[in-house]
């Protein structure tokens, strides 16, 4: 082993330990609920908790709705900006990046000020209104990821020619978007969708301030009131996020459309 | 009124007029090529016919119906693109059937039409493949079938052969022409390749700076060009500077050599003109009869196999001429004094 290699290995090992040790520690701790034996008792308790099932189910539904709404807003926008208004692209890109710059707490306070019960549109006053507000807020939070992935996907296909070809064959805008454009940026949409899912599942600030019982506040509540279960919950949350990342990789690698691009 | 009638078509992008007063009537079943260099406006005219660009003024009519304001998807015009533009997520069959599906054709009718189209382009076994599994030539054939499947009134081809290699270009252009003849579909073909335009078309429109310089059969365009641009752009051409001595009698001066063209000229006496001759009408040596004979020296010899291209320096410039290879007669040596002859009638007179 040469000296150069040694230092490379050392750097990689150090980096790996930095990220893995806390996780290993957390996993180890989550297994020690039963005295004197390793067990998945903490996981069993968490998974059996009806509040876990309720909040997790709620967050999953909300994440899926966020993805659907995000796709409906982002795909046509990114498509028409590329096709008709390429000059607007930097502006749109800047706007979609704003949620990364402005903290969620600022956004949600803005929402509460504008949509409170004494406003013209008192969304926070009803169950439906609050949920819609949360959904719209999550779509905004997911914009940077969704827009970037879709825009990158659109760059890899010749949307102008494909659009004109479809038009000359009689297709209208709805058909062009659903049959020609969307399937060809499907992998990009999926990677945006999985990132959105990961964000929405663990989101705390929006949900807590709008007083919604979603998975994020449940995890925080659990963290403040139990010993072993929060670690188990954190490991579960990590596993979900990793599964999302893994699925992105899987779809990107084995999709027939990604072969087209190569 | 012609089947496809283009009247006073104009297109300006800001202050730049890219198409100027373009007029053309295309008969039903005719194959018309737009030929010209890049930026001459040929593709813009095609895109206006397709509905992808809106004319600044003018009208486009098909069978007497004005379609100028109609969106592209309601024109019933098929189009083949340079970059194929096949839908990557659909199979060959689905690509070809796309227009039929949009038109609301039944499943059985679509299947039979797609099969018919696959037979027409000679790829019946490739229906289940995706575009990325096909070669460039095959993709362009599928694009042609896709454009033809919904039975469009007019077919537009936007440089469909430009992205292909030389051998496939030739075979595909023959195939396109055969299919066009079989179906009798009115076709406009845009190209910058004169060989393609001359070999495929019923008529050629030579375009230059947004204007249709000349419209005619390939034979007319090649042999009787009406403008200097057409003469120079289509085929290769020898240009010799000359001065008109007597316009009525057709006498000009080529350097110091008097030449009689035996026909009245349009220019005035003393005016400078250009005499133009295609390489194949210039012959080496003195010919009998109605010929202009010029003396010169061999300046260049290119042996191309079946054809030998020779350049002769004469008064007024260089003359390029083509002779067929003859095994018993080697090409002339450089610097050899020779005489070349051109028939009076074949010499074109162009404004200088």
Image (cartoon, grey):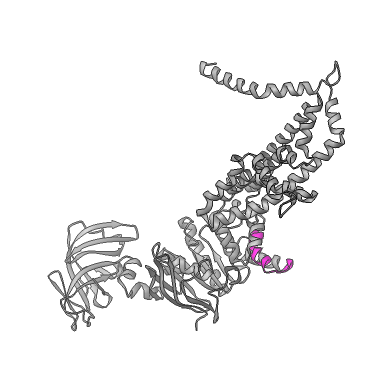
Picture mark count? 0
Query: Is B130 situated above or below A29?
Result: below
Based on the picture, tell me whether residue B232 belongs to the magenta stretch: no
Residue plotted at (73% across, 46% down): A134
The residue lying furthest to the front in this view is: A118
> Residue B134 at what x, y percent from top left?
59, 53
**Quadrant of res A227:** top right
Magenta stretch: helix, strand or loop mostly: helix
Based on the picture, tell me whether residue B100 belongs to the magenta stretch: yes
Q: Is any atom of residue B45 visible in this view?
A: yes
Q: Is any atom of residue B84 visible in this view?
A: no
Quadrant position of the C terminus of chain B in the picture: bottom left
Q: Give the camera-side residue of A38 and A104.
A: A104
Left or right for A41, reference B276: right
Residue plotted at (68% across, 21% down): A21
> Residue B117 at what x, y percent from top left?
63, 66
Q: Give the camera-side residue of B297 and A52.
A: A52
**Quadrant of res A35:** top right
> Residue B152 at what x, y percent from top left?
59, 72
Residues rendered magenta in the picture: B92-108
Query: Is B336 situated above or below B181?
Result: above
> Residue A156 at what x, y percent from top left?
56, 49
Query: Is A224 situated above or below B255?
Result: above
Residue plotted at (55% across, 66% down): B79
Q: Give the camera-side residue of B43 and B276.
A: B43
Left or right for B241, reference B230: left
């Amino acid at each position: 082993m040469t000296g150069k290699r040694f230092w490379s290995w050392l750097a990689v090992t150090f980096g790996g330990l930095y990220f893995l040790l806390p996780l290993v520690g957390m996993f180890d701790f989550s297994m020690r609920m039963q005295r004197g034996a390793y067990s998945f008792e903490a996981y069993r308790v968490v998974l059996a908790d009806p509040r876990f099932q309720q909040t997790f189910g709620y967050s999953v539904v909300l994440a899926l709705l966020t993805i659907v709404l995000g796709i409906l807003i982002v795909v046509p926008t990114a498509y028409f900006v590329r096709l008709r208004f390429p000059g607007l692209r930097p502006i749109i890109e800047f706007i979609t990046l704003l949620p990364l710059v402005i903290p969620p707490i600022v956004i949600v306070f803005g929402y509460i000020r504008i949509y409170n019960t004494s406003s013209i549109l008192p969304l926070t006053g009803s169950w439906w209104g609050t949920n819609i507000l949360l959904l719209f807020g999550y779509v905004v939070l997911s914009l940077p990821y969704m827009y970037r992935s879709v825009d990158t996907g659109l760059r890899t296909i010749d949307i102008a020619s494909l659009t004109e070809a479809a038009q000359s064959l009689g297709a209208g805008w709805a058909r062009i978007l659903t049959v020609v454009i969307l399937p060809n940026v499907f992998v990009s949409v999926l990677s945006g969708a999985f990132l959105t899912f990961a964000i929405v599942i663990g989101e705390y600030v929006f949900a807590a301030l709008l007083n919604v019982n979603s998975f994020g506040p449940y995890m925080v509540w659990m963290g403040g009131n139990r010993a072993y279960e929060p670690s188990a919950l954190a490991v579960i949350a990590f596993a979900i996020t990793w599964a999302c990342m893994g699925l992105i990789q899987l779809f990107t690698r084995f999709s027939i459309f990604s072969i087209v691009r190569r | 009124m012609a089947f496809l009638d283009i009247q006073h078509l104009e297109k300006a992008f800001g202050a730049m007029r890219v198409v100027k007063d373009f007029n053309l009537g295309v008969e039903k079943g005719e194959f018309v090529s737009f030929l010209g260099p890049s930026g001459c406006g040929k593709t813009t005219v095609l895109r206006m016919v397709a509905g992808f660009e809106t004319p600044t003024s003018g009208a486009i009519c098909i069978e007497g119906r004005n379609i100028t304001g109609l969106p592209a998807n309601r024109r019933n015009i098929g189009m083949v693109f340079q970059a194929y533009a096949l839908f990557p997520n659909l199979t060959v069959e689905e690509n070809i059937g796309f227009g039929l599906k949009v038109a609301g054709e039944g499943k059985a009718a679509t299947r039979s039409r797609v099969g018919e189209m696959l037979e027409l382009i000679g790829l019946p076994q490739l229906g289940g493949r995706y575009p990325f599994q096909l070669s460039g030539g095959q993709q362009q054939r599928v694009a042609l079938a896709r454009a033809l499947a919904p039975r469009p009134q007019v077919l537009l081809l936007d440089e469909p052969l430009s992205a292909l290699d030389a051998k496939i270009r030739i075979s595909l252009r023959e195939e396109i022409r055969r299919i066009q003849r079989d179906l009798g579909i009115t076709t406009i073909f845009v190209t910058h390749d004169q060989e393609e335009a001359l070999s495929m078309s019923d008529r050629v429109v030579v375009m230059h700076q947004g204007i249709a310089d000349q419209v005619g059969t390939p034979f007319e365009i090649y042999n009787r060009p009406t403008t200097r641009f057409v003469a120079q752009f289509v085929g290769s051409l020898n240009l010799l500077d000359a001065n008109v001595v007597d316009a009525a009698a057709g006498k000009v001066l080529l350097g110091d050599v008097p030449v009689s063209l035996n026909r009245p000229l349009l220019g005035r006496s003393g005016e400078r003109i250009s005499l133009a001759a295609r390489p194949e009408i210039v012959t080496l040596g003195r010919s009998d009869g109605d010929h202009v004979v010029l003396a010169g020296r061999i300046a260049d010899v290119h042996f191309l196999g079946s054809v030998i291209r020779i350049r002769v320096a004469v008064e007024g410039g260089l003359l390029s001429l083509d002779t067929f290879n003859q095994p018993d007669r080697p090409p002339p040596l450089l610097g050899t004094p020779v005489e070349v002859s051109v028939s009076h009638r074949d010499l074109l007179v162009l404004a200088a």
